[in-house]
Image (cartoon, rainbow, N blue to C red):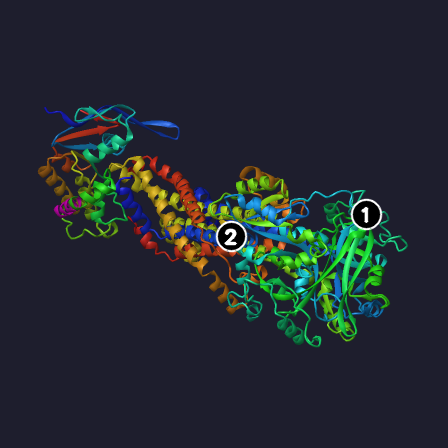
Amino acid sequence: MPPVYAWFLALRYLAARRVNLVGMLGVAVAVWALIVVISVFSGFLGEITDNVRASSAELLLTGVRERSSYEAVREVLERDPDVASTAPRLRHYAILYPYQPPRALGGPAMSTRALEANPLAFNFVELLGIDPEREARTSAFATWLANPGTGARSALASLYRVDDPAAPFAVPRERQEEAMRLLGQRVPPGGLLEASPGILMSWRRLRFSEQVEPGQQVELVSARFAEQARAEDLKKIRGRFAVAGAYETRHRLFDDSHALIGLEALRTLLGHDAADPEGTDLVSEVAIRARPGADLDTLARRLAAAVAGVSGGTVQTWRQQNAVFLGAVEQERGLMKIVLFAVMLVAAFLIYATLHMMVTGKFRDIGILMALGASPQGIQALFLLCGLTVSGLGCLLGFLAGRWSAVHLNDVNDAVHARFGIELFPRELYSLERIPYRLEAEWIVQVLVAALVLSLLVSYLPARRAARMPPVRAIAYE
Amino acid sequence: MTQPVLSAEKVVKGYTLGGETIPVLRGVDFQVHAGEMVALLGASGAGKSTLLHVLGLLDPPDSGRILLAGQPVHDLPIRERAAIRHRQIGFVFQFYHLIPELTALQNVLLGRMMLTRPLAWLRERRAARARAVQLLESVGLGKRLRHRPAQLSGGERQRVAIARALIARPRVILADEPTGNLDSHTAAEVLEILFRIHREEGISFVLVTHNAELAARCHRIVRMKDGLVLG
Amino acid sequence: MYRLFLALHYLLSRPIHLLGMGGVMLGVWALILVVSIFSGFLREVRAHVQSATSDLTVFRLRWPTTYRGLEQRLAEDANVAATAPRLVWYGLLHPIERPGAAPAPQEDLPTRADARFVSLIGIDPASERPVSGIERWLGDVTEPRLRVAQPADPLPRNAELPGILLSRTRMQRENLVAGARVRLTLARMNAVNGEQQLHFLDREFQVAGAFTTKHVGFDESNAFVPIDTLRAMLAEGEGAVVNEVAVRLVDPADARATVERVRRALLRDHPGVMVMTWEQRNEIYLQAIGHQGSIMKLILFVIMVVATFLVFATLSMMVVEKTRDIGILTAMGATPAGVLQVFLTCGLAVTTVGTVLGILAGCLSAFYLDAFRSWMKAAFGIDLFPTSVYHLERVPYDLDPLWIAQVVGASLVLGLLAAGIPAWRAARHDPLRSLRYE
């Protein structure tokens, strides 16, 4: 602990010269920028990662052998004490046609902007056949249904909200007929013979489509090979579904490509019913939810080994399922690190310069203090305290400012937008309602500690110079 | 005679300037006894100030010894030398050398802070402050406690410096031309204070001066020339 | 003269004053390097996108539209160099002859089953050649097993099976070689007795070979087939139907104006038609990258601000230190303006030299970017730029003189501010007060 005069003088010195305020402000600006950038950045990454996580099952058994039966797999999987629940899934691909006279030609209709953004997304659809009851227990399915229309984004969203999450694929016949009437289609006399099974489209897809009525019928076209694949065995598939509503996982890649239908409906579509009596239980993947606290990686390996004899295939954690996407997201950090480092470095220069000049200016004081009995260590401590106080206050100020502006970022963005018509941060581009920010204590502590350590390092040089000054020269001459 | 409080034995000290060593002290023997007031006379460049700095342990001698109450102290580690300087020795300079940012009272208090840790200071603060106020009152500055050096006259500044030198209750005060920068009237006032302190507190003094009249009032006069003590 | 002399002397006598220079240099360096990487990247991506897109595209044509009338109307515009008919449709592609199961590469789950989806572009190779880069797209494929046999006539009319050009990435993913057979399934709505009915269309094709553009997104989804074959499937007996026309311009720089002109010319006969430049078609993608760059600029600017603080701090301390000199100068007859100039010169010298060094450092590290990047990677483990994510071979850079000029301007203005305030204070200094000091 430095002697009391070091503390006493450090504060007096700092208060006496306003230029030290500049040093403090410099550190504050740097810390402020670091905190805002990092919090928005981790907000972004965190949001994306959360969305990815919400769109995926914790564990997914995939790549199973053809004609794998769910019951057999389930029995093996659920025997594991760490498995909380499982849900069967069936996957196929199709081209989607709205059952409506398209505006210009016989092709699918869609918004041009959407088409240009991702031509595949709005014509092609991956069908995911699910069992709603089991799915709700295993993945975030319930949230997917609740997501669209949260917030005041659009009155349209509530229109597509699924009424009964327990039976999301049920679309009453009357509603389908109503949609046909609204679209100016001819309803057969006496009404539709039977209701088409429901299909859940992603909110993104619905939003970009030009006109889709709830209950509207859409047609799917697909094909699949029979088991012994020969050219002649390519079976054409077509099916008619009614739009039951919207879901949203908020993971763009998933939402752009997937439509959800009932597991049984997809089995029927693929011909695993009357013609294939043993096919009523087929799955192509199984979603698995682990018990809280279970280590996903070990569990994945254990389960893969367990099902090896039953269905084969691999078990992937949600991170593995999205490895490429998450990897690309993480890559973004490189340039950012350099920039932040440069900001810190210049702030450190600033501390160094002010302290160095302070030592020069206090040349005589150092001599006096030594004559009064100060040791070199004490003198060194005095100037280290000066540097630390400047950077400490700067850090505090920067932290408060950074926190404030991260919290009010959206307001600032709105205000600038309203005032000058410039959007600092185009939320539409990333389809976000608000600029996400995340004040992660871990990061902030890192930044602050780094700033303090750096300023301690750069304060050390001038402080050591002060401690080594020969006292006599300072006091002997005027 | 009693043992000297502070003494120099065969002290040699030189400075390097532009690659050349200039001898400043060339084997100086010097003592000051308890309660003694010694005047150090000599022309400019005779080595008076350097001797004072060496005696005050600010500058280590090239050879020779410095003894404090008979104990050699010149070769102690730098921290201990600083501590001795603080406890036993007080400095008064020609140019006052106050810290411009601090008030008169704070400048005096600074003389007590050198070795105290912050926690101990909390306990000692009150007593130290009372003593600082008392010292400033005794030098006639009771009404100027909160003035900064820039707001004080030269005589007042020097009186603050004297109070600062006294606060740690040193055994010896080394004064380097304490009146050299003052007009004769103010100088007389400051000197009276010094003599009074000497009388009342029994502190030894080494006074570097050009002033023969002042020197005559001291117990003993030591003359220096060309880095040597005469006679 | 004394002004310059003093300014230089002040600066050089105390190297600490040059620290501000280091700060300015660092800021300028980062601004130039990072922004040049970003604009280089944007330029590269634009070039990739442009290479896969024709200058203009006419689309949203009412069904059925025949090419002949359109072609004439388009040819009337002075800026139109050539046009090519296109028929664009969506389908599913199933390889029939697969030389063994392809081992699936590590890919994300949601995109995995995209494999079957294909966006078909029916083209007439002869008219396509002068309009788009198809010749280059075919020529860039080097693997002998994937190459088109006759690049001059990639989709021969008289072949036994109609040909199809698949992207190199698709062929590699599906483990296909030239000559393999695939089956395409598509569907279209037909009005039968006033009611819409979906009709399947299904045909076998032979893979003629691979094409590759540098635009990964384009390659991912598209395949080329002869327009006649596609017409026969979709529009039997309806003539030379098109739903898109690709246009090559004489002067691509004038594209925006041409778009308006062409659209107005076509609108009367083709209501609802849209005309877009390649930039407009890929607007969202390009915007997203451009925007990342501008956010980066904003953050980098913080460095300049902190560097300005640095210059300001050293300079105002210098002024305090030289209070006496200022008094003496004034006593010797210097005017306040002269004093102002001395310190202003100091500040500007620091900023100017810092800026120049920063530009040099920025340009050098951009020129030697690859070396710099591998050094950064080895020394700090920081990858400056993830080339693999954007399918680039090397980190692109683009030193834009305009941007450098902007950086210089900004740093000089900031330097002037940082120097101006202390210099002004120095000039206002009361000479008597500084001489009376002690």
Residue A265 in the magenta stretch? The answer is no
Same chain check for tags 2 and 1: no
What residue is shown at x 35% (from left), y 53% (from top)?
A18
- Is residue C83 shown to the viewer in this render? no
Q: How many callouts does the rendering have?
A: 2
Secondary structure predominantly adopted by residues drawn in magenta: helix
What residue would you read off at disc 1? C180
**Quick one: SS at disc 1?**
loop
Q: Are marks 2 and 1 in contact (CB under 8 Å)?
A: no
What residue is shown at x 78% (from left), y 52% (from top)?
A233
Nearest the eye: C205 or A281: A281
What residue would you read off at disc 2? A46
| Residue density around tag 2, few if under 14, some if 14–19, many if 20 or more, within 10 Å | some
Residue A314 figure quarter: top right
The chain letter under disc 2 is A
Residue A1 is situated, as x and y percent measured from the top left of the image, at 29, 39
Q: Which residues are magenta?
A: B128-138
- Is residue A221 shown to the viewer in this render? yes
Q: Mark 2 vs mark 1: give the one in front.
A: 1
Residue B27 figure quarter: top left
Gap in angstroms between the C-alphas marked 2 and 1: 45 Å
Residue B224 is situated, as x and y percent measured from the top left of the image, at 22, 29
Residue B8 is situated, as x and y percent measured from the top left of the image, at 21, 25
**Quick one: SS at disc 2?**
helix
Residue A366 figure quarter: top left
Nearest the eye: A36 or C19: A36
